[in-house]
Amino acid sequence: MNLVFLGPPGAGKGTIAALAKDYYQIPHISTGDLFRSNIKNETELGKQVKSILASGGLVPDEVTIAMVRNRLEEKDAARGFILDGFPRTIPQADALEGMAKLDAVVNFVLADEEIIKRLSGRRICKSTGRTYHVVFNPPKKEGIDDETGEPLIQRDDDKPEAIKHRLEVYAASTEPLIDYYRKKGLIVDLDASKSPEEVMRQLASLVKA
Ligand code: ADP
Ligand code: ADP
């Protein structure tokens, strides 16, 4: 099963992917997580993209496409994948066509006010990437990861100036992909405003394992 999760930042793609990867038994491949782990490990790629991520802009297509191509060649992706955060531009979508045949593109639909609430309350554990929300999904102990005990942080790009910029970038560069994939008959729309469990139920009923 080859799936793409499409939708604005903060719509819950990563949260649902964590449930869907077990349900469909396929790996969750998040380009944002891949970039953040390169930044954390101070790789060449990490150094190249650090300031782009902090500002909420997009990493150039060639760099992003090369990273995804490498990742899809890894053994675990042979059974399928959930691509979360890729493609984000038409050239990326064109490149993906040459790499794999998609079964569905899941479009997470959520109103802007809700997106802003979700992004501004998002907290993550830097080493595992696990995601929380101060109100909607708080950790057991405030500010601390449930499993590693590490302090939770707020991503630089979840601060107000970057959030605004990311929503503009989404509207200009990524939203056109909804039409692109709708014309190919691949779009499955999800009402992302419900609880994670309910969104996962919708997904399972629309995209059969
Ligand atoms: P969110 O989960 O909020 O949608 P991501 O974790 O997917 O954000 O992405 C974080 C950042 O990583 C993006 O703002 C962008 O700078 C970079 N990035 C992730 N995926 C891509 C992509 N497909 N193309 C270009 N840049 C990307
Ligand atoms: P994305 O990967 O699309 O950027 P995330 O999965 O990181 O989105 O979710 C963004 C924020 O919203 C996180 O703080 C997460 O805990 C919270 N969240 C995710 N799904 C839901 C939901 N269905 N209801 C309420 N909050 C949610």
Image: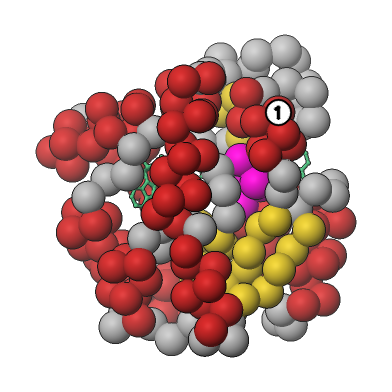
Residue at image location 78% in from the left, 72% down from the top: 204
Residue at image location 72% in from the left, 44% down from the top: 111
Residue at image location 46% in from the left, 20% down from the top: 161
Magenta-drawn stretch contains 12: yes
Q: Is residue 85 left or right of residue 73?
A: right
Give the magenta part as a residue range.
10-14
Question: Which quadrant is home to the C terminus?
Answer: bottom right
SS assignment at label 1: helix
Q: Vertical placement of 172 versus 189: above or below? A: above
The chief SS type of the magenta part is loop
Q: Is residue 23 left or right of residue 201?
A: left
Q: Which quarter is ligand 2 in?
A: top right
Residue 106: image location, x then y, percent: 62, 68
- Is disc 1 surrounded by few (<14), some (14 to 19) or many (20+) residues within 10 Å? some
Observer-nearest of 59 and 30: 59
- List the residue tagged with mark 1: 117
Q: Is residue 172 left or right of residue 62?
A: right
Q: Vertical placement of 151 versus 157: above or below? A: above
Residue 46: image location, x then y, percent: 22, 36
Observer-nearest of 190 and 19: 190
Residue at image location 72% in from the left, 34% down from the top: 113
**Residue 195 in view, yes or no:** yes
